[in-house]
Image (cartoon, grey):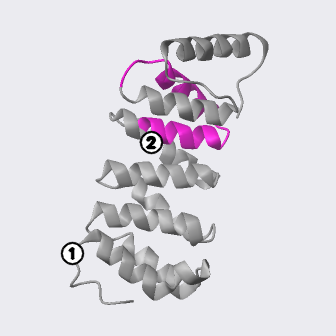
Amino acid sequence: MPRTSSLTNPNEIIAAVVASCGLHKHNVMDDTDAIQIVQLLKNKSPDVRRRAIKILFKFGSIEMLAFVAPLLKDKSGLVIIEACKVLGLRKMIDYIDPLNEVMLSSKLSIRTAAATALAQMGEQNGIDVLMTLACTRGKHQTTAVKAFGLVVGQKFHCTPRGIETMQTWIQHQKKYHAIRP
């Protein structure tokens, strides 16, 4: 691993490790590269941990993403949100229980990310929570509306009319169909 202990800027740390792995040149991560990136998941900087998750998602194998799951208990909300995104997008169903725990967070942004991940995995409780968050006013609503739309294959806008359209769509689906991703 390159000497990153003397670096304090998260951008410099990530740049040094990515350069040493040659990811920009090859777009492939071997086991040695993966070890270097996984070590960044333990870095004291939340930004470094968050960006390491993104690198593992982009270049790593599904097995490498197992190292992301412990970050669902990270102290940084942004790291937790990034971990939820990755686990949901890769449909890593082994982590449904930890994501259910994260969905109990008092922070709406974290709850939205966990619900989105669970909904992407086809979990009905994730869909239900995401639907509730999308219909609830607040600064999280835009994210929840977009995520709900993506999960159910619709495009909803976070405007009064867009929310109304989404709510009408939900009522129709509840009446005639099950809401599924």
* Horizontal side of residue 147 vs 105, given as left or right: right
Task: For residue 78, say whether it is visible.
Answer: yes
The stretch in magenta equals 111-138
Task: For residue 65, say whether it is visible.
Answer: no
Residue at the location (56% across, 35% down)? 147
Residue at the location (40% across, 18% down)? 137
Query: Compared with residue 167, is residue 58 higher up or lower down, i.e. above or below?
Result: below
Q: Earlier in the sequence, mark 1 or mark 2?
A: 1
Q: Using the image as rendered, state which of residue 127 and residue 159 is in the foreground.
A: 159
Q: Amino acid at mark 2?
A: Glu
Q: Position of residue 166 (x, y in %)?
A: 60, 17
Image quadrant where one finds the N terminus: bottom left
| Disc assigned to residue 137 | none
Q: Quadrant of residue 102?
A: top left
| Disc assigned to residue 101 | 2
Query: Compared with residue 147, is residue 95 higher up or lower down, i.e. above or below?
Result: below
Q: What whole-number distance in Å separates the C-alpha atoms at marks 1 and 2? A: 33 Å
Q: Secondary structure at mark 1?
A: loop
Residue at the location (61% across, 13% down)? 165
What residue is pinned by disc 1? Answer: 8
Q: Please check the rendered image and state whether residue 129 is part of the magenta-colored stretch, yes or no.
A: yes
Q: Using the image as rendered, state which of residue 179 and residue 124 is in the foreground.
A: 179
Query: Compared with residue 108, is residue 176 higher up or lower down, i.e. above or below?
Result: above
* Horizontal side of residue 94 vs 74, given as left or right: right
Residue at the location (48% across, 59% down)? 69
Q: Amino acid at mark 1?
A: Thr
Q: Please check the rendered image and state whether residue 68 is part of the magenta-colored stretch, yes or no.
A: no
